[in-house]
DNA sequence: GATTAGCACTCAAACGAGACGAGTGCTAAC
DNA sequence: GTTAGCACTCGTCTCGTTTGAGTGCTAATC
């Protein structure tokens, strides 16, 4: 199924042009703009072949040709020329990560904003904390109100989770500290996923005072803890409306609705297997509503064991080259930031 | 400027009809659907008067009339008939607040979802924590990693803020607890707004060990603390695209862009003075981009001193009756939930 | 004096016929 | 293998026409 050089070049030209203009590409356009040695008739023949091979579709007889999903696939896998970012662009990305932060939500928001402003696509950033992989390092109970305490869980990697619990009796700060010490010592090293089980075990031999706290801890899990996804930020939704493919309000609405359903966004960001960067085109996105979209995702493992997934969504006619370069640079800047964080931590 | 009864009724009919259909209303429609005793010619004369009085606009000579912002104002202030919710609707709202929660973010998300699904408008929920009004009740430092600690601030009302700090040396958990006790005792009762100042004072007489922590506390304020707004959730954006006024993609895009700018949303939700429920129509929203929108906001004071503002945004042709009833019911359900929380707290 | 029937007038939207033009496929000549 | 040429397709644009909902005004009616 190898395409001879010329067909290959023509196909590439068509895709390039279509990505740029969103208009079906005609043979004449190619012969003038890309392959001046060849007449439009020759191009026409080649295009006819390419259509037969499944790389091109024609909306109707007298329009030009449009790349098929198969063509985009080939384009992404083989035709993509590395497209270096301008100095300004690199600088811009770096500037977004200059200030240090430990608030993952802040960082995600910044990433989302930066990416959607640079690419003009919609960006979703998700942070996953696989509970099975996270191991408790420290536990602390903090008094909040009379019969209300704050439970803080710190993992080995340094991730923090907290939730407010109602307890059946009032507990003095000093007692709370004592309980924290005991629990912290007993539970240190437990994977978060095993925590509920361990708590039940412990409450067997616990005295009355402790039992109430343990019970509250088991029962009052925060909603967030139900899923692994701890933060989900979406930016640049309005960008979608600039694309001619969404000049039809109904289509735009359908896509925006998907973006409003947390589970759907999570699933769109998720099924990229173990790839670091993945490009899914049209039906590969695995969702009916996004059959005309492409999704590019990149995942990074944070030092605390959490996984950050960054996704860009747009029409299949996506500027893959640009998107991949930008995502790559973001990845580099991000690891730099994280490394620096870690280094600072070491040095001190 | 009082409108005689009949004019008043006719105006009301026009607004009702326009809100329902989004189509300019003609004299014939009114005479058939609303005022069957009167001929279209009579209505026509009245409508002409109403236009002169500034209550109606005509898009062009041969279309019907459209209510002006002044008309909506009158409608909201005087014409609104209480529109009781159906049993199902009330039940639905209540069901959204059944599960108790201390996570304001969860609650906000639920409110936003419920409101946008019931009204088909876009909902924004904001939580403000006026630092000047919040008074520290307890402070706790929790070990996170080698030279990294978590600072937890608990206010008298029971609100919790936390941030991760980098400190210049490694501190044992027990020392951290001792420092927490000292600081907690010294700072208890300080308004959060006065905290930075107090910290500087304290670091004057502090020993070396403490000084580093105090410095980290003053310097490393989390981004969130910069503003009073601690959470902002928006739901039902795609609803906007169902309204004929946004069938023009550019208009939709402009409005969606506003919703993507945090500061703008905060400002839209904010300037309702001290009203519990406020309705702002068109230019009253105070923003160029929303001159064709109306915004209804409701504010509730939470028991911990924070203020929750719920806002609905849609075209000026908004179903004010329905929106106000739903918001009212949400307010009731919400206070019930909060009261119950408080009662539980008392009883135990 | 208020109401209404009647009528001329307006104007956006819907419709339809052409003209246009970008594009194709095919054939025949180079 | 390439290309010039040509007939054909079909969406889009343009423009005049029709339609119909609506208005304002006037004169007759209650």
Image (spheres, coloured by chain):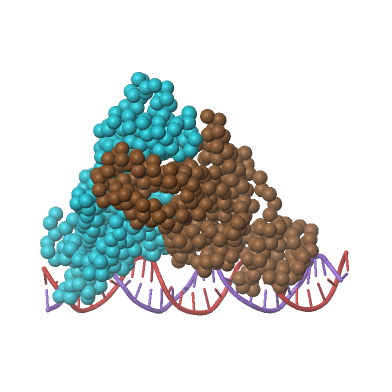
Chain colours: A cyan, B brown, C purple, D red
Q: Position of residue A259 (x, y in %)?
A: 39, 51
**Dividing the picture into quarters, in which one does residue A252 lie?**
bottom left
Q: Position of residue B235 (x, y in %)?
A: 47, 51
Q: Quadrant of the N terminus of chain B?
A: bottom right
Side of A199 relative to A212 (left or right) = left
Q: Residue furthest front?
A: B205
- Counting the numbered discs, the total is 0
Looking at the image, which residue is at 24% across and 56% down?
A337
Does A40 sit above or below residue B193? below
Looking at the image, which residue is at 56% across and 61% down?
B271
Residue A113 in sight from this viewpoint: yes
**Dividing the picture into quarters, in which one does residue B332 lie?**
top right
Residue B159 in sight from this viewpoint: no
- Is B156 in front, or is B254? B156
Looking at the image, which residue is at 49% across and 59% down?
B266
**Dividing the picture into quarters, in which one does residue A214 lie?**
top left
Q: Position of residue A219 (x, y in %)?
A: 42, 30
Looking at the image, which residue is at 52% across and 29% down?
B348
Side of B232 relative to A112 (left or right) = right
Q: Position of residue A90 (x, y in %)?
A: 24, 65
Does A125 sit above or below residue A246? above
Side of D10 relative to A190 (left or right) = right
Does A198 sit above or below residue B149? above
- Is A92 in front, or is B8? A92
- Is B14 in front, or is A233? A233
């Amino acid at each position: 199924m190898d395409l001879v050089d010329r067909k290959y070049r023509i196909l590439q030209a068509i895709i390039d042009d279509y990505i740029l203009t969103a208009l079906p590409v005609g043979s004449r356009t190619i012969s003038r703009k890309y392959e001046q040695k060849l007449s439009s008739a020759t191009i026409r023949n080649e295009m006819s072949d390419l259509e037969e091979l499944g790389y091109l579709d024609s909306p109707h007889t007298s329009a030009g040709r449009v790349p098929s999903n198969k063509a985009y696939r080939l384009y992404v896998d083989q035709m993509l020329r590395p497209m270096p970012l301008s100095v300004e662009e690199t600088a811009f990305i770096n500037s977004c990560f200059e200030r240090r932060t430990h608030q993952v939500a802040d960082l995600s928001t910044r990433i989302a904003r930066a990416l959607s402003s640079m690419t003009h696509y919609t960006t979703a950033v998700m942070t996953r904390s696989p509970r099975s992989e996270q191991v408790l390092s420290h536990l602390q109970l903090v008094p909040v109100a009379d019969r209300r305490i704050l439970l803080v869980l710190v993992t080995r990697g340094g991730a923090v989770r907290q939730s407010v619990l109602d307890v059946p009796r009032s507990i003095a700060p000093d007692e709370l500290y004592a309980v924290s010490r005991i629990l912290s010592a007993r539970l240190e090293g437990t994977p978060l996923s095993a925590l509920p089980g361990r708590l039940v075990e412990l409450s067997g031999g616990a005295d009355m005072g402790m039992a109430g706290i343990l019970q509250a801890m088991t029962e009052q899990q925060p909603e967030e803890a139900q899923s692994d996804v701890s933060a989900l930020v979406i930016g640049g939704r309005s960008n979608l409306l600039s694309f001619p493919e969404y000049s039809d309000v109904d289509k735009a609405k359908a896509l925006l609705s998907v973006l409003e359903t947390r589970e759907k966004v999570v699933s769109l960001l998720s099924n990229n297997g173990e790839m670091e960067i993945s490009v899914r085109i049209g039906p590969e996105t695995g969702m009916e509503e996004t059959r005309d979209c492409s999704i590019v995702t990149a995942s990074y493992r944070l030092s605390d064991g959490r996984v950050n997934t960054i996704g860009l969504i747009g029409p299949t006619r996506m500027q893959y080259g640009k998107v991949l370069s930008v995502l790559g640079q973001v990845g580099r800047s991000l690891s730099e930031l994280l490394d620096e964080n870690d280094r600072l931590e070491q040095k001190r």
